[in-house]
Amino acid sequence: MEEQLEKVLFGLGFKPEELDRSLSTFSGGWRMRVELAKLLLAKHDLLLLDEPTNHLDIGAILWLEDFLQEHEGVIMMISHDRQVPDAVTKRTIEIVNGSIEDYSAPYSKYLVLREERREKLMQAKKNQDKEIDRQKELIEKFRYKDSKASFAQSLIKKLEKMERIEVDDYHQKSVRFQFPEVPRSGKDVLKLDKIGKKYGDRRVLSDVNFELLRGDRRAFVGQNRQGKTTLAKIFVGALRADAGDRSLGTNVHLAYYAQDQAESLDPNQTVLESVESVAPNDVRPKVRSMLGAFIFIED
């Protein structure tokens, strides 16, 4: 059991020297990893996992995929990460239009099968609509003729009992972003020169040199606690480096979306008030539709 316990905890990113630390010294995200480890070690017959990768970095996610592939029990998973259910699951359950569709396939294959099913439904609905129109014409033609009135009534009852084919419009619903025009910046956007940062005795960054040019797209990828957030905070000026220089280029305006961004919200504001408080005048008329795209309904 000791060997299995270490395998799971190390796989989820814990270090040997951390195993005897108090839970109170860990962040909420790391305590969630402890909860996940407890589930994985208990050898349950059924694992119901609701977005298990939310608090995991890439290394831990890849380890979890391998672990779940070897799990002998039943797994039911809810996930926004397409890659994990693709690697782990064999069936996909779709809930749409108040009903459930069951596909014997992982997520990527489900998308293909779903589109094939939808095309067949669209054709069937097209044929059904034609038949409905044909019967309505017959009803109008015969309902006022005494000799055909009973026939017209039978068609009316047949139409009322007909189960109408519904085609969901799921694929048509999407969030569309349109970023407002901004003043053109200089070629140099941001530059770090020999940046250093430490917390107490722990040095997180040392002699970091980095440059962003106009048009660049960059991603920082790495395990948790490697300094990605620290570097991001130094970028935006939310954290001061212990050594080195940070410089912004001409006409550069920064926007920062942090992992704890929700803590900066005013809980006394409504959703609408919160967004309108930062929206430029020309964007204000679009705020409601933008919130609707993020599934905030009228009330």
Image (cartoon, rainbow, N blue to C red):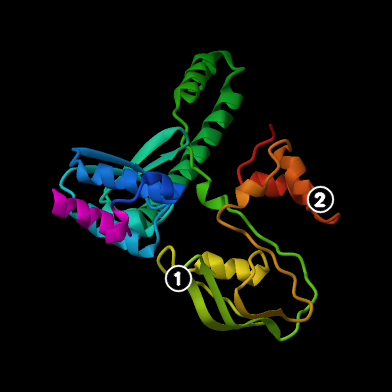
Residue 87 visible, this orientation: no
Residue drawn 68% across and 31% down? 299
x and y, in percent, of residue 258 in the image: 59, 58
Residue 197 visible, this orientation: yes
Residue drawn 57% across and 83% down? 210
What amino acid type is highlighted by mark number 1?
Val
Q: Which residues are magenta?
A: 1-19
Residue drawn 74% across and 48% down? 275
What amino acid type is highlighted by mark number 2?
Arg
Q: Nearer the viewer, residue 13 or 49?
A: 13
For mark 2, give the secondary structure.
Answer: helix
* In the image, farthest residue toward the right: 281
x and y, in percent, of residue 100 in the image: 38, 36
Q: Which residue is mark 2?
A: 284
Q: Nearer the viewer, residue 87 or 144?
A: 87
For mark 1, give the secondary structure.
Answer: loop
Which of the 4 quarters of the picture holds residue 121?
top left
Q: Which callout, 1 or 2, points to the residue nearer the camera?
A: 1
- Give the crowd class for mark 1: few <14, some 14-19, many >=20 residues within 10 Å: few
Q: Earlier in the sequence, mark 1 or mark 2?
A: 1
How far separated are the C-alphas under marks 1 and 2? 36 Å
- Give the crowd class for mark 2: few <14, some 14-19, many >=20 residues within 10 Å: some
Kindly report the secondary structure that dominates the magenta region of the rendered protein.
Answer: helix
Residue drawn 24% across and 59% down? 66
Left-right relation of 153 to 36: right
* In the image, farthest residue toward the front: 201
x and y, in percent, of residue 130 in the image: 52, 40
Q: Which residue is mark 1?
A: 221
14 up-or-down from 241: above or below = above
233 up-or-down from 290: above or below = below
